[in-house]
Amino acid sequence: MNLDVRKSQIVQELETLATFSDTPAPAVTRIVFSEVDRKARAWLKNLCIEAGLHVREDAVGNTFARWAGTSPELAAVGSGSHIDAIPHSGRFDGTVGVLGALEAIRVLQRGGIRPRRSIELLLFTSEEPTRFGIGCLGSRLLSGTLDLARATALRDGDGASLDQLRAAAGFSGSLDSVALPAAYYHAFVELHIEQGPLLERAGIPVGIVTAIAAPATLKFEIEGEGGHAGAVLMPDRRDAFLAAAEIALVVEAAAKGTGAIDTVGTVGICEIFPGVVNGIPSLVRILAAVRDTDLARPAAVLAVIQRRAEDIAAARRVGLRSQVLNADAPTETATLVVDALRSSADACGLPYQTMVSRAYHDSLFMARVAPTGMLFIPCRAGVSHRPDEYAAPDDLEQGIRVLAATLNRLAN
C-alpha cells in the first residue's frame, strides 16, 4: 500500500491554522466559541468538504467529517482531536491529531483505498478547560459521562452560560442529543504530540499508548482577614495567601510521597484578593490537580491534601472551603487498537515504544464508549503548552503514515 503523506501540505495547514489566534505568532490562543475559534472551524470544515467528506455538527459543536465506506451500516472507525488552545500556547497540541487524521484519510484516498467501514474525523469541542473550568467538555458529553445539569450550569469567567455561548457560535439543540449511540464507533484512535521528552531522548519515531492518566481537581477557598500591610503586626495576621502557599507545598509533597513516577500534582490557579501590595490577602482561591495512571493512588493523595489543608487552616486561623471539581478514572487503551498500531508501525518499518500518557486527552472519555488507542510522535524537548512547542515535519509524516495504515487496518 502506497502511503503518500504530503508533508509540506501538512506543515502549511498547521501554520495556517495557527494564524487563527487571539495572540500574535508564535503564540497561539484559541478559546472555544470565540471569533477565532469559529473562523478556524469554518476553515477546517472547508478542508474536509474539499476532501469529499460529509460534515455534520452536534449541539455543542463537536464536528464529524465522514468518509463513507462500502458498508456504511457498520460501526465507523474514528480519529481526531481538538483545535482549541490555551492562552499563549503552541501550534501542535491537538491540531496534529485533527489535521493528521484528515491527511491520513487523504493518503488512503490517494492510494485508491475504499474502506469497508466508514472512517470519520472527529473534532472535539473544548478539550482545554480554559473557558469553562472543565477539560474535555465535548468528549465528556459524547460519552455520556458529564451530568447534563452540571453542563447546563457551566459558566465562563464573565458569567456567560454554555447555552448562551454555544448558541452565539451557531450550535443549537438539546445537550442530551450529544451522547453517541451505542456501538457508534468500532474503534477510535487519536494522534498527538507526546508532550513529554521520552521519544525524542530515545530517538524513537512513534509511541503507542497503553494507558491514559486522569485528573482529579480540588478547589480551595481560604478566607483570612485583610488589613493594612504595614499596620497589622505579624503575630496578629490571618493571611489567606500564606495558608494557600502551604497547601500548594502539600500538593507537591503528597504527589511525591506516593513513590510513583506517574503521580503528579500541580497548583495552576491562584487568585488573591484584594490583590494589592499594601493589603494583607483576605481571600485566596486555588485549584490543585492530581494526575495518575493508577486508580487508587489519586484518591489517597487527595485525602492527604484535604487533611493537611484542614490542619494548616486551623493553625493559621483561616477559614477553609474545599470542593472536588472532578475525579476522573484513568484508563487502559484497547488491545484491538494497540495491536493495530503495532502492526501498522511494523508495516511502515518504524520502531515504536509503548508508553503511558501522563497528559489526559479526549481519548480518555472515548474509551468509555469505544475501543480506543493513542499514537504519539516526538515533540522538541518535550515542550508543550508554550509558543516554542514544535514537532518536526519528518515526525509528522511518520505519525500520519502509521495512523493511515492503522485506520485502513481497523476499517477493513
Image: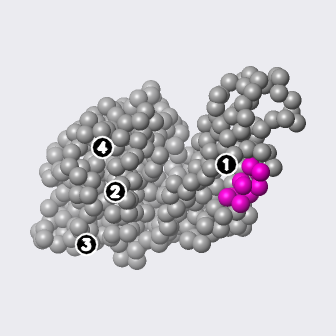
Which residue, given by chain and number where applicable, does mark 1 sit on? 320
Task: Point out the stretch of residues depicted in magenta.
Answer: 305-314
Q: Colour mode?
A: one colour
Q: Of residues 193 and 33, which is closer to you in this image?
A: 33
Question: Badge 1, how many Cα within 10 Å: few under 14, some, many 20+?
Answer: many
Tag 3: amino acid: Ala
Q: Which residue is drawn at 30% across and 43% down?
A: 163
Alpha carbon of mark 1 to alpha carbon of mark 4: how far?
32 Å
> Which one is in front in this view, the residue at disc 2 or the one at disc 1?
1
Is the C-beta separation of discs 2 and 3 under 8 Å? no
Question: Badge 2, how many Cα within 10 Å: few under 14, some, many 20+?
Answer: some
Left/right of residue 294 with respect to residue 396 in the rendered view: right
> Which one is in front in this view, the residue at disc 2 or the one at disc 3?
2
Is the C-beta separation of discs 4 and 2 under 8 Å? no
> Which one is in front in this view, the residue at disc 1 or the one at disc 4?
1
SS category of the residue bearing label 2: helix
Which residue, given by chain and number where applicable, does mark 3 sit on? 183
Which residue, given by chain and number where applicable, does mark 2 sit on? 148
Q: Which residue is drawn at 50% across and 67% down?
A: 330
Question: Badge 3, how many Cα within 10 Å: few under 14, some, many 20+?
Answer: few
| Residue 19 locus on image (x, y percent) | 36, 31
Alpha carbon of mark 4 to alpha carbon of mark 2: how far?
12 Å
Left/right of residue 16 with respect to residue 364 in the rendered view: left
Is the C-beta separation of discs 1 and 3 under 8 Å? no
In this rendering, the answer to whether 227 lies above or below 235 is above
Mark with earlier residue (4, 2):
2
Mark with earlier residue (2, 3):
2
Tag 1: amino acid: Leu
Is the C-beta separation of discs 1 and 4 under 8 Å? no
Mark with earlier residue (1, 3):
3
| Residue 391 locus on image (x, y percent) | 47, 47
